Amino acid sequence: MKRILALVAFAALPAASVAAPGMDLREEGRAVYNFRCYYCHGYSGDARTLAATMLATRPKAFSEATPGEMPPARIEQAVRRGVAGTAMKSFEGTLREREIAAVTAFVHDEFVVRRAPNTRYHTPENGWPAHERYEAAFAFARGDLAIDAPGESLSPRERAGRDLFLTTCITCHDRGRANDAGPAWQKSAESRGAPR
């Protein structure tokens, strides 16, 4: 829980703009979201993250909302003021006015209206050169293979990929799945693990 609180606090730290000059508003919003918001709300806006499982109140799953339930004004208000009784704190002193407008436009269009899966985040520009070297974990990150699959059903490469996913990728990727989503997968990072 301390790690989650530290990461939520980090997300709220003031920083230089993450958007590049000349980007259109929605793409500026994508840059803000991919830097500040994905950890709790999920890379694809569905709040299926490890961080989300550790919070008393689940972060908003934008992809589950209708445009009527989640208009831009409501998104902007949450970004600007936070949401009482949740881990969502105000970003008013952290984000510039244009960044608030940009992330509002992005979240509304990308997740609420189009229910799009976002774009690939792991690019050299985002600090992930040669991300393909982690390919063994991709099937677990996408949910193609269950993280609790019996070890004997996985190839040595798949077992190595699962280990990589569980030790490195699970905190951010929101598509991982378990065959038996029981208590061991619903508690905290310390209780997560998969049979060998």
Image (cartoon, rainbow, N blue to C red):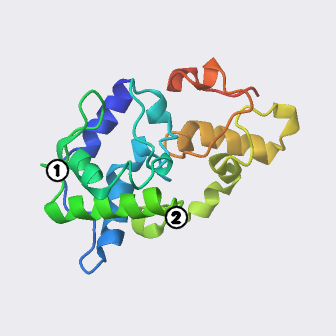
Q: How crowded is the residue under tag 1: few (<14 C-alpha within 10 Å), some, or many (20+)?
A: some
Image coordinates of residue 177 in percent, x first then y, are 66, 38
Q: Is residue 101 left or right of residue 29?
A: left
Residue 87 falls in image quadrant: top left
Q: Is residue 148 left or right of residue 108?
A: right
Residue 71 falls in image quadrant: bottom left
Q: Quadrant of the N terminus?
A: top left
Query: Which residue occupies the extreme front position in the image?
Result: 68
Q: In the structure shown, which secondary structural element does the residue marked by tag 1 occupy?
A: loop
State whether residue 30 is above or below residue 91.
below
Image coordinates of residue 158 in percent, x first then y, are 77, 45
Query: Which residue occupies the extreme left position in the image?
Result: 93
Q: In the structure shown, which secondary structural element does the residue marked by tag 2 occupy?
A: loop
Disc 1: which residue: 94
Image coordinates of residue 67 in percent, x first then y, are 41, 56
Quick one: 16 or 77, which is closer to the camera? 77
Q: How many marks?
A: 2
Distance between mark 1 and mark 2 Cα atoms = 25 Å
Q: Quadrant of the C terminus?
A: top right
Q: How crowded is the residue under tag 2: few (<14 C-alpha within 10 Å), some, or many (20+)?
A: few
Q: Residue at x 17, y 43 (%)?
A: 81
State whether residue 191 is above or below residue 178.
above
Q: Residue at x 24, y 48 (%)?
A: 79
Q: Residue at x 17, y 50 (%)?
A: 94
Disc 2: which residue: 120
Q: Residue 159, which numbered label?
A: none
Quick one: 94 or 107, which is closer to the camera? 107
Amino acid at the residue labelled 1: Thr
